[in-house]
Amino acid sequence: MRSNFRPNIRLATNIFLVIGTFAIALKIAPIAEVYQEKNLCIKYLKHQINRDKLIKRLKIVKQANPSSICDSILKS
């Protein structure tokens, strides 16, 4: 009769790897969002995207000044 110790260790290791991968992905998501906003602002300041597209993607009100918002995003 064989021992099930090694297959159980492999299964446990795989489960921990999956859990660890998702934990890392959840920690990285907010950081990626900040960099996406910074990239949008840089594109706006270089005139690669227009004001309406920036307002739509950043989900800000149209009365706000995108340049000042981009300045505050880029400083953080």
Image (cartoon, rainbow, N blue to C red):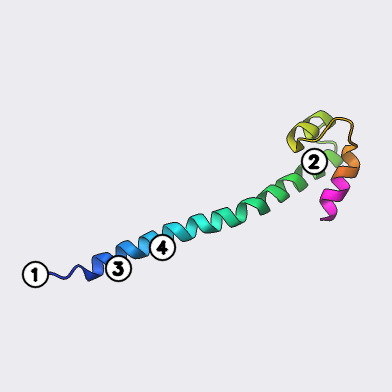
**Closer to us: mark 2 or mark 1?**
1
Q: What's the amino acid at mark 4?
A: Phe
Badge number at residue 43: 2
- Asked if residue 61 is among those painted magenta in the image, a careful observer would answer no
Q: CA distance from mark 3 to mark 4?
A: 11 Å
> Residue at 55% across / 54% down in the picture?
25
Q: What's the amino acid at mark 3?
A: Ile
Badge number at residue 1: 1
- Tell me the SS state at disc 4: helix
Would you name the residue on which mark 3 appears? 9
User: 39 above or below 49?
Assistant: below
Q: Position of residue 55 (x, y in %)?
A: 80, 33
Would you name the residue on which mark 4 appears? 16
Residues at badges 2 and 1 in contact (C-beta under 8 Å)?
no
Q: Earlier in the sequence, mark 3 or mark 4?
A: 3
Q: Magenta-highlighted stretch: main secondary structure?
A: helix
Which residue is at the front of the view, 39 or 75? 75
Q: CA distance from mark 1 to mark 4?
A: 28 Å
Q: Position of residue 23 (x, y in %)?
A: 52, 58
Q: CA distance from mark 2 to mark 3?
A: 49 Å
**Closer to us: mark 2 or mark 3?**
3
- Tell me the SS state at disc 3: helix
Residues at badges 3 and 1 in contact (C-beta under 8 Å)?
no
Q: CA distance from mark 2 to mark 1?
A: 66 Å
Q: How many residues crowd mark 4 within 10 Å: few (<14), some (14–19), many (20+)?
A: few
Q: CA distance from mark 2 to mark 4?
A: 40 Å
Q: Earlier in the sequence, mark 3 or mark 1?
A: 1
User: 37 above or below 19?
Assistant: above
